[in-house]
Amino acid sequence: MTSNEQIAALKKPTVVSAEEWERAWQAMLVKEKEHTRARDALAAARRTMPWLAVEKEYSFEGPQGKVTLLDLFEGRRQLVLYRAFYDPGVYGWPDHACVGCSLGADQVSHLAHLHARDTTLAYASRGSQENIARLKQRMGWERIPWYTITDDFDKDFGVDQWHGHNVFFRDENDRVFRTYFTNNRGDEALGTVWSYLDLTPLGRQEKWEESPAGYPQTETYKWWRWHDAYGNEDKKWSNVVDNATVILKL
């Protein structure tokens, strides 16, 4: 906790009137909107990146035994796969995973919202399924699918020495493609539904997005549900969105 002495030593900003504060906030809001637009443009650029075909077969261990990379999609179209360091020799082993990877797991929001956008999030480590199951229960990460790497997957996809998120797409013929990769500070802000979807080739799949022709897109906000209510049409919510008196600006 920051001490009173440290706070007293800070060079604090000027204290102003409510009117001056409002003007300063409005000026900051302009910059924040520019940042939002730039972030949207960056996500749009990701959606036009070329894909890399995954030709090699990879094997993982899951709670029910051996699985393939294709199995990790759980039947969905997109997969965001995080390489978490829960391996022998990692600081904290076997009681804990890597401190940074653990902080990231704590940030993961409810997966039902990603699933509604045809996207699966999963973790992979070198730890055994027995240890992973114990760790997930202890840390409250039961919802996150977490697999054991058994071959060269981590080396082949740039995550044998450091953490990282690889994004994959499964096409109509069940061919798998690598579409994006981020690590280092690119990982630190991930965890929300939007942060993951913005990495994927299909994006948020809302009509305001700039995406290649033919990409699936639905009306903004209308697909949202309570996390235990997906799969059911909600006409009342659609009416709320249509008749909202407060316009939600993108």
Image (spheres, rainbow, N blue to C red):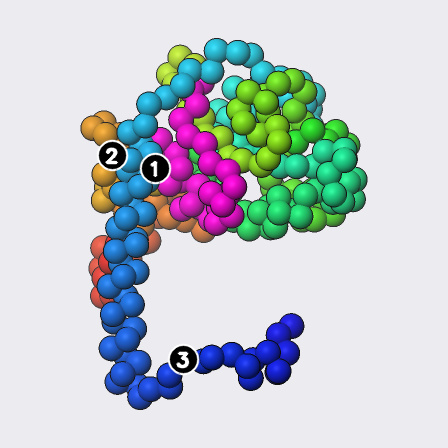
Report if the CB atoms under discs 2 and 1 are less than 8 Å apart. yes
Label 3: state its secondary structure.
loop
Which amino acid lies under the numbered mark 2 shown in the image of this protein? Ser
Q: Where, quadrant-wise, is the C terminus in this rendering?
A: bottom left
What's the residue at 28%, 38% (across, down)?
Answer: 44
What's the residue at 30%, 54% (across, down)?
Answer: 35
Label 1: state its secondary structure.
loop
Q: Residue tagged by mark 2? A: 211
Calculate the distance from the C-alpha at mark 3 to the C-alpha at mark 2: 42 Å
**176 on left or right of 164:** left
Q: Residue tagged by mark 3? A: 13
> Looking at the image, can residue 87 be seen?
yes
> Looking at the image, can residue 110 be seen?
no
Viewer-nearest of discs 1 and 3: 3
What's the residue at 51%, 79% (across, down)?
Answer: 10
Q: Is residue 196 magenta?
A: yes
What's the residue at 72%, 33% (across, down)?
Answer: 87
Q: Quadrant of residue 213?
A: top left
Q: Is residue 41 magenta?
A: no
Viewer-nearest of discs 3 and 2: 3
Q: Foreground: 247 or 86? A: 86
Q: Which residues are magenta?
A: 176-202
Q: Residues within 10 Å of mark 3 (few under 14, many from 20)?
A: few
Calculate the distance from the C-alpha at mark 2 to the C-alpha at mark 1: 8 Å
Relative height, residue 223 to residue 160 (above, below): below
Report if the CB atoms under discs 3 and 2 are less than 8 Å apart. no
Q: Foreground: 126 or 176? A: 126
Q: Position of residue 139 (x, y in %)?
A: 70, 49
Q: Quadrant of residue 134?
A: top right
